[in-house]
Amino acid sequence: MRNYSPANWGVVAQSARRAYLWVCPTVGALAPLFGPRCPVMWLDEQVTHLFLTSQSRDASAAAAQIETFVSSFVGTVAEFKLTEVMLFLARYKAGVYGRSFAAFDVRNVGQTFHHEFVQQRRQELQAIEAEATAGRDGEERRLRAAHAVSREAICVCSATGAVWGSRCGSGRQRCRRAVCVVWRSCLARVPRPW
């Protein structure tokens, strides 16, 4: 659990992409892994660190607020990865969500999480997915271009496989090289018939 301590907020904040794609448990998965109190204790550590680094100094009032807040907030963030919650708290501490960090208020932490971070997370995940899709599409286009069927070769594809034609696309020369056929995004090498 050392990797998921508040000391590593800076590492997580350096790359939101890494925070979203990092393989780590969700807050809710901590209970079966380490015991039923673990999610509450982990989140309590995170929120307490947020209080200790804020300008607020009323520790007795903050302790009561933090305990109540954490017990209800654990259910809200149960489906989020540890790194995603850490990313939110790091951004909150850095002032990304306004000047709310100056005065510690757990209600503001919860509202900021629901109203700003969740939307921002959705947009960032959509951008990551769009980038990944574009990368896959670009790789597929590159592979298709590298292994495209040329006009000089005819290959008739049927449900049973690939069958060689006897003439080239222009009808003037015999086909003398292997042709790659792209079939359902899989590349299959067709051998020379002679």
Image: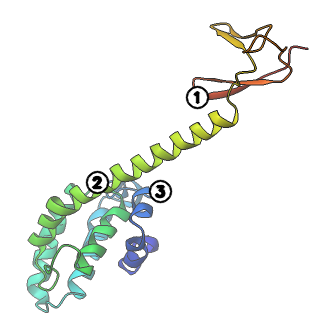
Q: Give me the residue at 47% from left, 45% from top.
A: 134
Q: In which quarter of the image is residue 185?
A: top right
Which residue corresponds to the image point at 28% horizontal and 68% vertical from the top-left?
A: 88
Q: Which amino acid does label 1 sit on?
A: Ser
Q: Is mark 3 on a helix, strand or loop?
A: loop
Is the residue 15 above or below the residue 33 in the image?
below
Query: Disc 2 and disc 1: Cα gap in Å?
Result: 29 Å
Q: Identify the amino acid type marked 2.
A: Gln
Task: State left or right for residue 187 relative to residue 90.
Answer: right
Question: How far across and how far down the image is residue 138, in percent?
Answer: 54, 43
Could you say whether the residue bearing mark 1 is in a helix, strand or loop? loop
User: Where is residue 7, by image quadrant?
Assistant: bottom left
According to the image, label 3 marks what residue? 23
Q: What element carries label 2?
A: helix
Q: Residues within 10 Å of mark 2 (few under 14, many from 20)?
A: few
What residue sits right under mark 2 in the picture?
A: 123
Position of residue 15 relative to residue 156, above or below, is: below
Circle 3 crowding by C-alpha within 10 Å: few under 14, some 14–19, many from 20: few
Q: Is residue 77 left or right of residue 7?
A: left
Q: Are marks 3 and 1 in contact (CB under 8 Å)?
A: no
191 or 117: nearer the viewer: 191
Tell which circle, 3 or 2, labels the residue nearer the N-terminal end: 3
**In the image, is 144 to the left or to the right of 76?**
right
Mark seen at residue 185: 1
Whole-percent x and y of residue 40? 26, 65
Q: Distance between the residues labelled 3 and 1?
A: 28 Å
Q: Of the two numbered discs 2 and 1 on the same chain, state the one appearing first in sequence.
A: 2
Between discs 3 and 1, the one toward the N terminus: 3
The tally of labels here is 3
